[in-house]
């Protein structure tokens, strides 16, 4: 009897505890597998919906948030938008996001799922024409944020206002942020 109690305490109890621990870990891993299967099902559903998009819808989605931005194409697009109002942008500048490289041995900081490009340019226009340009920027399908607007009186303001202040021309410096996926 003493031998069976000693056997139970020394061999069976620790083995039973190890089995219980493994069973708990197995149950936890099984729950993770169920969650992964559920997530995979959701991904498949989204992929199916994406594949059912028409070409127009896919193009619109790529316009709103493109995979990457070609800075030359971006400046040309903004030139066309500004040209609709009969204006010409001066000093266009595009700043691309800085590339992020993880440092060896350090946990890298979480990065955003998108890249932010900043575009700035200057135009000379009467206030009403400038408002029309802002309206065009706002109604554009591409995801853009006007970050800042600075204005000053144009060198030709005095000569162009003769009796009608709405014709006064101002220099507007506009800074716009636009986004792309990584």
Image (cartoon, rainbow, N blue to C red):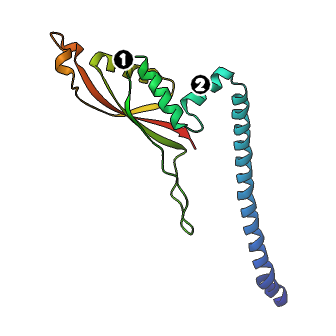
- Image quadrant holding the N terminus, namely bottom right
| Label 1: which secondary element | helix
- Image quadrant holding the C terminus, namely top right
Estimate the x, y position of residue 123 in percent, counting from the top left: 33, 26
Please give the label number shown on residue 60: 2
Tell me if mark 2 has few (under 14), some (14-19) or many (20+) residues whose alpha carbon lies within 10 angstroms of its own.
some
**Quarter location, residue 139:** top left
Seen at 55% across and 37% down, the residue is 70
Would you name the residue on which mark 1 appears?
132
| Label 2: which secondary element | helix
Residue 143 visible to an observer of this rendering: no
Seen at 33% across and 17% down, the residue is 129
Q: 106 or 144: which is nearer to us?
A: 144
The Cα atoms of the two marked residues, 1 and 2, are separated by 23 Å
- 91 lies left or right of 112: left
Q: 14 or 129: which is nearer to us?
A: 129
């Amino acid at each position: 009897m003493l031998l069976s109690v000693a056997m139970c305490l020394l061999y069976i109890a620790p083995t039973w505890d190890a089995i219980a621990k493994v069973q708990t870990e197995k149950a936890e891993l099984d729950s993770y597998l169920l969650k992964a299967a559920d997530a995979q099902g959701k991904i498949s559903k989204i992929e199916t919906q994406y594949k059912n998009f028409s070409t127009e819808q896919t193009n619109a989605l790529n316009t709103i948030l493109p995979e990457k931005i070609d800075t030359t194409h971006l400046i040309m697009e903004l030139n066309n938008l500004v040209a609709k109002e009969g204006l010409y942008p001066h000093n266009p500048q595009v700043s691309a996001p800085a590339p992020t490289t993880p440092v060896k041995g350090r946990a890298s900081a979480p990065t955003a799922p998108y890249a932010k490009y900043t575009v700035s340019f200057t135009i000379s226009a009467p206030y009403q024409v400038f408002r029309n340009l802002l309206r065009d920027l706002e109604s554009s399908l591409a995801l853009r944020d006007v970050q800042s607007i600075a204005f000053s009186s144009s060198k030709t303001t005095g000569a162009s206002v003769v009796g009608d202040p709405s014709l006064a021309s101002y220099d507007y410096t506009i800074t716009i942020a636009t986004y792309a996926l990584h």
